[in-house]
Amino acid sequence: DQQVKQNSPSLSVQEGRISILNCDYTNSMFDYFLWYKKYPAEGPTFLISISSIKDKNEDGRFTVFLNKSAKHLSLHIVPSQPGDSAVYFCAARGGSGTYKYIFGTGTRLKVLA
Amino acid sequence: NAGVTQTPKFRILKIGQSMTLQCTQDMNHNYMYWYRQDPGMGLKLIYYSVGAGITDKGEVPNGYNVSRSTTEDFPLRLELAAPSQTSVYFCATSPRQGANTGELFFGEGSRLTVL
């Protein structure tokens, strides 16, 4: 039972353009959604998060949108840079007193110079 | 400030051997987690802990054990290593739930190969 899904294993985008990474979830009790970036041989690093009570959060070039009715969130990176090339994981935190973070399978982003 | 420290970084085990992956944190975070990442896959939660003396199973706990005797340390034990446990293991921490961003802080990972 995959509660958090990233259906696109990879994405290629030209430098300077927008990158849009998508994530779907099934559990309406999740209270926080997060995006992590991972380079090879390193641990994931936190990018941005959004509370379930909001629909948008912005931090510099990164914006996360949450559509609760569709159980869908997306990460927008504008403008995309070659250094953004990495694997991006979507994650969701269990609400209602649970403390589990469930991750998607990741999307490999390649930004072409 | 070390953050989350995992040891060892690399290890090769024979089938049936046992070992402990160490995780220690200096951020005074209550919550600690162990994840594994298989090639081309996401991170799967093995065990987690909400504080000293309290642990609970995640998505894939079979073949593993944990303990949490102190706030700082959360070791992961493999009792009878199997090839299916070949993976990269990540330890992560989080401050008390309700912190602003919900962020998890990860260690650099421990790559384990079982032959």
Image (tube, rainbow, N blue to C red):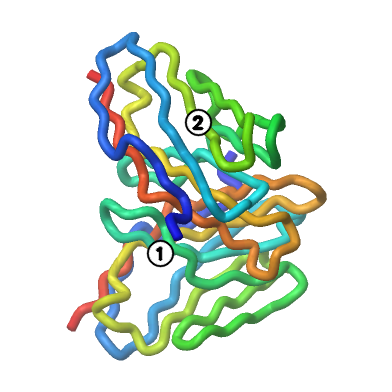
Left or right of residue A55, residue B12 in this image: left
Which residue is at the front of the view, B108 or A7?
A: B108
Percent of width and height locating residue B18: 38, 15
Whether residue B73 sits left or right of residue A13 in the image: it is right
Q: Where on the picture, by quarter, is residue A68?
A: bottom right
Percent of width and height locating residue B59: 57, 34
Q: Residues within 10 Å of mark 1 (few under 14, many from 20)?
A: many
List the residue tagged with mark 1: A37
Farthest residue toward the left?
Answer: A113
Q: Amino acid at mark 2?
A: Pro
Q: Quadrant of the N terminus of chain A?
A: top right
Quarter of the image where the C terminus of chain A is located: bottom left
The image position of residue A70, as x and y in percent, is 67, 66
Question: Label for residue B75?
Answer: 2
Question: Which residue is outermost to the top?
Answer: B16
Residue flagged by tag 1: what amino acid is it?
Answer: Lys
What residue sits 30% from the left and 90% below the top? A16
Q: Secondary structure at mark 1?
A: strand
Q: Chain of mark 2?
A: B
Picture layout, residue B99 above or below residue A82: above
* Residue located farthest toward the right when viewing the structure as drawn: A96
Tell me the CA gap for discs 1 and 2.
Answer: 25 Å
Q: Quadrant of residue A80?
A: bottom left
- Using the image as rendered, state which of residue B43 and residue A42 is in the foreground: A42
Q: Is residue B20 above or below residue A102?
A: above
**A16 over B76 or under it: above or below:** below
- Dot 2: few (<14), some (14–19), or many (≥20) neighbours within 10 Å? some
Of the two numbered discs 1 and 2 in the rendering, the one whose residue sits closer to the viewer: 2
Tag 1, which chain?
A
Left/right placement of residue A59 relative to residue B12 reads: right
Identify the residue at image location x=73%, y=56%: B97
